Amino acid sequence: MGRPLTRLRRGMQGTGLAQLSPRRRALISGVALLALVAVAAAVLAALHPGRAGPRGRPAASRLGPVLLVPGYGGSTGSLTVLADRIRATGRSATVLHLPGTGTGSLVADAAKLNAAVNAVLASGAPSVDVVGYSAGGVVALIWARQDDGAAKARRVITLGSPFHGARIAAGAAGFVPGACPTACQQLVPGSSLLSSLNVGDPAGLPPWLSLWTTDDQTVTPPDSARLAAAIDLPVQSLCPAVRISHSQLPTNPVVTAIVLQAIAAGPLHHPSSSACHGYS
């Protein structure tokens, strides 16, 4: 911004503006500077249409790639099924491979997600959507909190994610400590990591859908998936007849239909009951 101001001052010296009072010159200089800023913003918008929405967020109408984050243990099999369904709609979808065995620090997993998001955006994509399954949703929340996810992700969809922790992790940590590696310890209710994520504060997060099942016997209680920033949706509140276990979330056709609705163009809305077709 310094160079435009210098040019502006030089231009003033060769015009009648130099004869004006200091106060009037300052006023005219300020107006000219605002004009320069407006022109610069217009040029950036023309060069990168749809890259930003309200408050600098990615535009809801511009679809980009989808990144899917596996749960505890890092298995990609079930998410690959969901990724294939997303690709069938014409979208690019990539399942991340987590560091090591997928049981290390969720913070390291979030760094892997951040690198993938940055690479997608650096390649020219207008936006990115993130889908996190189980602990992968906690990874997405860590990333969103620590790496300005609201400015990078068009939206985030999480499936059965234990934002408030899981009793199974607490049991493993308490009775079989050797069987509870770092990620397990971080998923214990009240852990320092979970406490730092401010799950009750919606500020600073991208549009979010937290989808979970009341039949969950892995993430208990199932409503550990509640997140203040999110559209909070137990599948059974939309489709009462559906029975879905935790492991079935990435492959169940109702969940898939809801995810496809949620990642469509336009603002994120509460999914419609059309996803329940055949289960009502």
Image: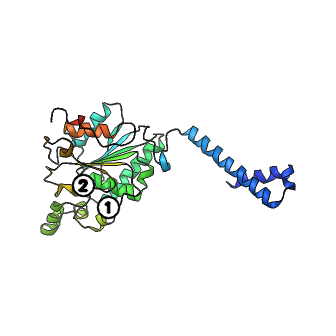
Amino acid type at image mark 2: Ala
| Pointer 1 local density, CA inside 10 Å: few below 14, some 14–19, many at least 20 | few
Residue 19 x, y percent position in the rendering: 87, 55
Residue that numbered label 2 is attached to? 225
Q: Is residue 238 left or right of residue 41?
A: left
Against 152, residue 275 (above or below) is above
Against 197, residue 43 (above or below) is above
Residue 132 numbered tag? none
- Quarter that holds the C terminus: top left
**Residue contact at pointers 2 and 1, CB within 8 angstroms:** no
Q: CA distance from mark 2 to mark 1?
A: 12 Å
Against 27, residue 279 (above or below) is above
| Pointer 2 local density, CA inside 10 Å: few below 14, some 14–19, many at least 20 | many
Residue 202 x, y percent position in the rendering: 36, 57
Identify the mark nearer the N-term, 2 or 1: 1
Amino acid type at image mark 1: Gly
User: In the depicted view, which residue is nearer to us: 241 or 113?
Assistant: 241
Residue 5 appears in the rendering: yes
Residue that numbered label 1 is attached to? 200
User: In the depicted view, which residue is nearer to us: 189 or 202?
Assistant: 202
Q: Is residue 114 left or right of residue 246?
A: right
Marks 2, 1: nearer the viewer: 1
Q: In the image, what residue occupies the spot 85% across and 54% down? A: 18
Residue 30 x, y percent position in the rendering: 71, 54
Against 121, residue 175 (above or below) is below
Count of marks, rendered view:
2
Q: Secondary structure at mark 2?
A: helix
Q: In the image, what residue occupies the spot 28% across and 41% down? A: 271
